[in-house]
Image (spheres, rainbow, N blue to C red):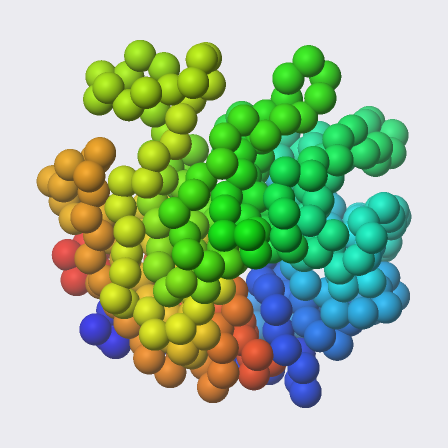
Amino acid sequence: MKDILSVVTQFSAHPDSRCWFVAWNPTGTLLASCGGDRTIRIWGQEGDTWVCKSTLEEGHQRTVRKVAWSPCGNYLASASFDATTCIWKKKQNEFECVTTLEGHENEVKSVCWDFSGSLLATCSRDKSVWVWEVDEEEEYECVSVLNSHTQDVKHVVWHPNKEMLASASYDNTVKLYKEEDDDWVCFTTLEGHESTVWSLAFDRSGERLASCSDDKTVKIWQEYKPGNEQGVICNGTDPCWKCVCTLSGFHMRTIYDVSWCRITDAIATACGDDALRVFEEDPGSDPHQPTFCLTAHVPKAHAQDVNCVAWNPKQAGLLATCSDDGDICIWKYQPQNNPSV
C-alpha cells in the first residue's frame, strides 16, 4: 500500500511547537500553516523545494488553531486560543492584519468562509457558532450567534455551493444551519457518534458529509430531500440527513481530521495513531448504502499525532498533513486502479 501514497517532501513548519492545521489557497499554489508558536506561515514551491514565503506573527497572543482562505484567495482568516479571529489581506507577497474579530468568550477553534466569500463562520469553546457578514467595504458584522451545542464546538464548515453551515462538537453531535427570516437557525442535528466529533468535510456536490470522531469512526451522511424516492421521512420542507455508512475498525485512536477530495472523491483521514489513511467508495456500491475500502495506509506518517489532512484543490492526488511534531508532509496519492491521478 505504501507505494500508492508516497512522501513528496517533509519539512519543519513550526519548530519546537505543534503544527495544528494546514490550508491550501484556492489555486493550490500556497499552503498556510498555523501552530502553537502563535504564528501563521505561508509556504510556496520553488523548484522541488517548499519555502516559507511569509511569517504572520503580529496577530495573536496564543496558539493559532485554524486558518482558512477566502474563495478569491486574497484574504486569510485565523482562529486563535486568544478568543479572536484575525483577517489578513494579501498585498503582493505580504499579508497585513486588517481586522480582528472579537466576541467569543474564550478559545476560537475554527473559522471558515462560505463559497461566495460574503459570509464567515467561527466557533469556540464557549459552545457558540457565530456567523459574520462581510460587506464591500471589508467591514465584518456578526449577524447571528448560534447556541445550539451544549459543549465546546470544534469545527465549522460551509456547504460548497449554498448558504448552509455545519458544526461539530464535544457534545458528540453535528448541527446544520440555514438562514430563515433574516436569522440563522439550526434545522437538524446529526446524532450517532459516541464521542467528540472533531472535523467535517462535504463532498463536491454537498449532498454528502463526512464526520470524524474520538470514537475512532468516520460517518458518511447523505442528504434526502422531502418526497425522496427512498422513502426517508423529512420534517416539513427541510431536507434530512441520514448516516448511510460508518467506517470503523480502521483507526486505532482519535480521528482528528477528514478531507474529501473535490477532484477524485477520495477521503483522507488524520489520526492520533500517527497514521494517514485514504478511503475510496467501492465502484458499483449502492449510493444509499455505500461501502468504502481502505486504499492507502501509512502507519508512521508523522512522529506524533496527525492533526490535519488537506487535499490540494487543483492537483489530483496531492495532499498535505501536519502534526504535533511541528512538521508538514506533502504526499502524492496514486491509486493502482487509476494511474492518471
Q: Quadrant of the C terminus?
A: bottom left
Number of numbered discs visible in the structure rendering: 0
Residue drawn at (25%, 76%) of the image: 2
Judged from this view, the residue extending furthest toward the left is: 284
Q: Quadrant of the N terminus?
A: bottom left
Residue 334 can be seen in this image: no
* Percent of width and height locating residue 36: 71, 75
Please tell me which residue lies in front, 165 or 321.
165
Q: State left or right for residue 142 relative to residue 148.
A: right
Say left or right for 215 vs 115. Answer: left
Residue 167 visible, this angle = yes
- Observer-nearest of 313 and 150: 150
Instruction: Judge by depth and name the residue closer to the eye, 247 or 206.
Output: 247
Give me the residue at 81% from left, 49% from top.
Answer: 104
Query: Is 62 placed above or below 73 here?
Result: below
Foreground pick, 171 / 290: 171
Q: Residue at x 68, y 87 (%)?
A: 16
**Is 304 situated left or right of 163 in this image?**
left
Instruction: Measuring from the top left, give residue 18's x and y in whole percent.
Output: 63, 78
Residue 255: image quadrant is bottom left
* Position of residue 60 measured from the top left corner of the image (x, y, whole percent): 84, 64
Relative to 282, 258 lies left or right: right
Q: Where is 87 relative to 239, above or below?
A: below
Q: Quadrant of residue 74?
A: top right
Residue 142: image x %, image y %? 81, 34
